[in-house]
Amino acid sequence: ESAGDADGAGQAAAEPAEPALPEAEGFPNMIALESKEYEHKRPIVQFTHGLHVDKYGADCGACHHDSSGAPIEGLKKGDPVDRCISCHDQPGEPPKGKGAPELTKAEELQFHAEALHVNCKSCHQEYNDKNNTKAAPTSCSKCHAK
């Protein structure tokens, strides 16, 4: 499985004033993390794909992984990848609150939004911890900007 419509690795910060990177063939610099398969409750994340790879040094395998969660080795710009929802095929987030079923971590990761949140936030938190900063966003409103 791979994550062609989403992914988040080591972002230093949301940088809308960043100059545009040249588009590589088959490699979008910006990806709207929108899945038409369900209604999103927050504004759509505009993922700075090119910056994550070219500026922040994110390895393709940080987001694009196989069915066991292991990074897909040897990916390069322009290689075809599946959309996240191809495997994380439950719409939105897992049920929460009183009366919600208890799910295993694997069951929670079947939910599309949960898989993206876990991947992005864990990478951002790791970056922040490693660099003693808060530059990589971990709150809802920083990535789901209005």
Image: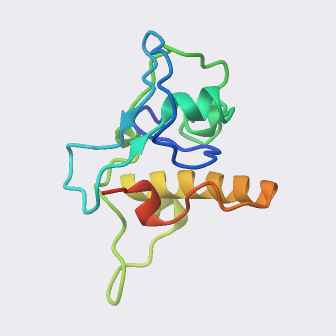
The residue positioned 34% from the left and 90% from the top of the image is 98
Can the viewer see residue 106 in this picture? yes
Q: Position of residue 24 (x, y in %)?
A: 48, 12
- Most foreground residue, 2 or 28: 28
Quarter location, residue 34: top left
- Most foreground residue, 114 or 43: 43
The residue positioned 33% from the left and 47% from the top of the image is 89
- Most foreground residue, 26 or 113: 26
Can the viewer see residue 2 in this picture? no
| Figure coloring | rainbow
- Most foreground residue, 86 or 49: 49
The residue positioned 29% from the left and 61% from the top of the image is 42
Q: Position of residue 47 (x, y in %)?
A: 44, 40
Q: Residue furthest bottom?
A: 98
Q: Is residue 38 above or below residue 79?
A: below
The residue positioned 30% from the left and 57% from the top of the image is 146
Q: Position of residue 33 (x, y in %)?
A: 35, 43
Q: How many marks?
A: 0
Q: Is residue 72 above or below residue 40?
A: above
Query: 67 left or right of 101?
Result: right
Q: Is residue 128 above or below residue 84?
A: below
Q: Position of residue 30 (x, y in %)?
A: 41, 31
Query: 28 left or right of 90?
Result: right
